[in-house]
Amino acid sequence: QVRLVESGGGSVQTGGSLRLSCAASGSISSLNCMGWYRGAQGKEREGVATIGRDGSTSYADSVKGRFTISRDNAKKALSLQMNSLSPEDTAMYYCAAGRSDNCAADMNYAADMNYWGKGTLVTISS
């Protein structure tokens, strides 16, 4: 069984930065795709960024140039560096992992991810 635990959320002002981390435990060798999704209260979960085992990345248009996703396969770790944050980035951020071969498509198809963390809250004040 795979377990994902997020950390690094918090409250910052507009223009600030945060770095989210996700620690994976269990067997993740078959999980090609990892990613970050976010969901505001009452809204559907949206893809923020995904990364394949080969390091290929995809980003939502709203975060391109501001967020950077990275993974360390040996350490079973996933990170999301978030810069130039705005109130629109306020949400619960979730770490996810899946067996899909098409990480880019999983940006828009969260249901393809097999495992989810419980989330970490990011709040940006103006």
Image (spheres, rainbow, N blue to C red):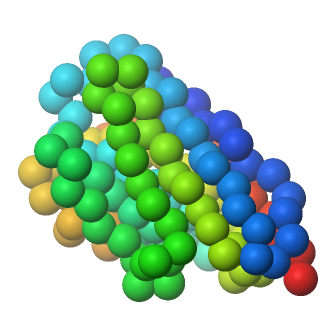
- In percent of width and height, residue 118 lies at 61, 40
Q: Quadrant of the C terminus?
A: bottom right
Residue at the image point whose x is 84% and y is 63% from the top: 12
Q: Nearer the viewer, residue 116 or 53?
A: 53
Vertical position of residue 68 compared to residue 114: above or below: below
Residue in view at x 66 percent, y 37 percent: 7
Residue 52 lies left or right of residue 45; in this view the side is left
The structure residue drawn at horizontal position 27% and vertical position 61%, both measured from the top left corner, is: 57
Q: Position of residue 53 (x, y in %)?
A: 19, 41
Horizontally, residue 24 falls left or right of residue 111, namely: right
Find residue 115 and report its image quarter: top left
Do we see residue 1 in this rendering?
A: no
Q: Is residue 12 above or below residue 19?
A: below
- Quarter where residue 29 is shown: top left
Displayed quadrant of residue 73: top left
Task: Identify which residue, 55 or 93, lies in the foreground.
Answer: 55
Percent position of residue 39, x then y: 61, 66
